[in-house]
Image: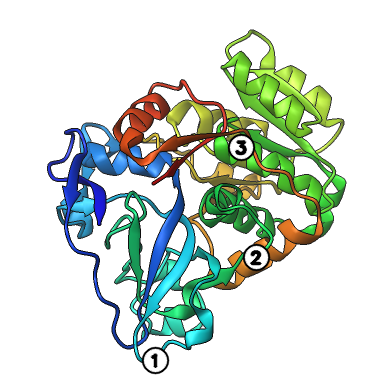
């Protein structure tokens, strides 16, 4: 089994070769056919998150140990199962749900494993998909994708799921009647733009500073796009909304983007922060109740939501975001390209 691992934070990935694990019990060995490259992978490789004010959240403080094989957007073929895995599951393609919890706490039993306090997420706390094989702890985390190509399905596990879960947190009437302001036209922002349409939303106003990404957002079906580095952008966004702005989803998560998003909200609006660019934000607390403003962090989504999303992808004609397919050995270069902003859409690695 060939994998590309973090062996030291803030250092290049290292190629490793070892025997593939043998699944036991409920475990399933999946032959990886596609693994998406995500900004979370960039942050994890760096070894920390920027908390602002000179403070850092280090990966080892989160319980992330090394060596670690990155990759949490995984699609592939189930090739071997433990004694509790039905033989009928083998030899078929699946999308892997990576946000695995302990499985026994109240949160997990309520179906919210992505919120578990003792996570075992693939590619973050357990070996992930930057490999030719990955071990999945239970067959319930495998979602059949008989009619979706692996490179199209893989990004649904994070890029798709995170945006779908964020949109599900918006009142359906609000989604149908008012545009969603989408900050960041990277892989998640483009996916969000497409999902707003698939869910019957009014549409999205997409904000970025990269003209190539803004053009991609237009192609993805945005109502309008805005270069926020230009003077008067906020006024133009409000004018394009044609009324209340009640929903902002920030896929960047910097001080500047959050401040902009909050300033755009109408009374009673909500901003969801998804991106992890980092920083520290001072808040005038009385303005939260006076404006009835909600600030919500959004962290991936549940297993049920991923099942719903896969079904939606099948039935709605949801088209993929721009995707660059590369060989697994280009994992390090792909992280560098993503970090430098040279990618529009998603990179998918294929062994």
Residue 267 relative to residue 150: left or right? right
Where does the image place residue 251, in percent across and percent down from the top left?
A: 53, 38
Question: Relative to residue 92, is residue 176 depicted above or below?
Answer: above
Q: Which mark is residue 39?
A: none
Where does the image place residue 292, in percent across and percent down from the top left?
A: 65, 50
Q: Which residue does the numbered mark 2 point to in the structure image?
A: 146
How many residues crowd mark 1 within 10 Å: few (<14), some (14–19), many (20+)?
A: few
Where does the image place residue 182, in percent across and percent down from the top left?
A: 65, 36
Residue 210: image quadrant is top right
**SS class, disc 2:** loop
Q: Which mark is residue 84?
A: 1
Would you say the residues marked 1 and 2 are in contact, meaning their CB atoms lie under 8 Å apart? no
Say which residue appears at 41% left-offset and 54% top-offset.
72
Q: Which residue does the numbered mark 3 point to in the structure image?
A: 189
**SS class, disc 3:** helix
Residue 329 relative to residue 34: left or right? left
Would you say the residues marked 3 and 1 are in contact, meaning their CB atoms lie under 8 Å apart? no
Residue 298 relative to residue 56: left or right? right
For the residues labelled 3 and 2, the Cα–Cα distance comes to 27 Å
Nearer the observer: mark 3 or 1; the answer is 1
Question: Relative to residue 290, is residue 302 depicted above or below?
Answer: below
For the residues labelled 1 and 2, the Cα–Cα distance comes to 23 Å
Query: Is residue 133 visible to us here?
Result: yes
Say which residue appears at 73% left-offset and 44% top-offset.
319
**SS class, disc 1:** loop
How many residues crowd mark 2 within 10 Å: few (<14), some (14–19), many (20+)?
A: few
Q: Quadrant of the N terminus?
A: bottom left
For the residues labelled 3 and 1, the Cα–Cα distance comes to 39 Å
Mark 3 or mark 1: name the one nearer the start of the chain: 1
Q: Residue furthest top?
A: 231
């Amino acid at each position: 089994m060939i994998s590309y691992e973090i062996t030291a934070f803030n250092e290049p990935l290292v190629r490793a070769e070892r025997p593939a694990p043998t699944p036991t019990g409920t475990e399933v060995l999946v032959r990886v056919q596609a693994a998406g490259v995500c900004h979370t992978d960039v942050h994890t490789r760096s070894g920390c998150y920027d908390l602002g004010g000179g403070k850092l959240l280090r990966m080892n403080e989160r319980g992330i140990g090394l060596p670690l094989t990155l990759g949490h957007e995984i699609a592939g073929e189930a090739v071997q199962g433990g004694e509790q895995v039905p033989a009928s599951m083998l030899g078929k393609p699946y999308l892997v749900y990576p946000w695995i919890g302990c499985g026994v706490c109240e949160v997990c039993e309520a179906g919210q494993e992505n919120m578990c306090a003792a996570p075992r997420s693939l590619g973050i706390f357990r070996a992930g998909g930057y490999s030719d094989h990955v071990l999945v702890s239970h067959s319930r985390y495998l979602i059949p994708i008989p009619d979706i190509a692996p490179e199209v399905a893989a990004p649904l596990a994070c890029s798709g799921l995170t945006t779908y879960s964020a949109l599900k947190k918006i009142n359906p009437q609000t989604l149908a009647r008012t545009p969603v302001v989408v900050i960041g036209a990277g892989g998640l922002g483009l996916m969000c733009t497409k999902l707003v349409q698939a869910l019957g939303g009014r549409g999205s106003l997409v904000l970025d500073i990269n003209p190539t990404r803004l053009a991609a957002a237009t192609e993805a079906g945005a109502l309008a796009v805005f270069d926020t580095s230009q003077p008067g952008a906020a006024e133009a966004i409000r004018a394009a909304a044609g009324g209340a702005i009640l929903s902002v989803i920030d896929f960047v998560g910097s001080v500047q983007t959050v401040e902009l998003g909050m300033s755009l909200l109408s009374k009673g609006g909500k901003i969801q922060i998804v991106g992890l660019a980092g920083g520290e934000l001072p808040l005038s607390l009385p303005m939260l109740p006076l404006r009835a403003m909600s600030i919500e962090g959004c962290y991936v989504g549940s297993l049920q939501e991923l099942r719903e999303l896969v079904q939606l992808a099948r039935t709605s004609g949801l088209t993929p975001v721009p995707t660059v397919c590369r060989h697994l050995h280009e994992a390090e270069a792909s992280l560098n390209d993503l970090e430098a902003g040279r990618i529009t859409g998603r990179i998918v690695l294929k062994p």
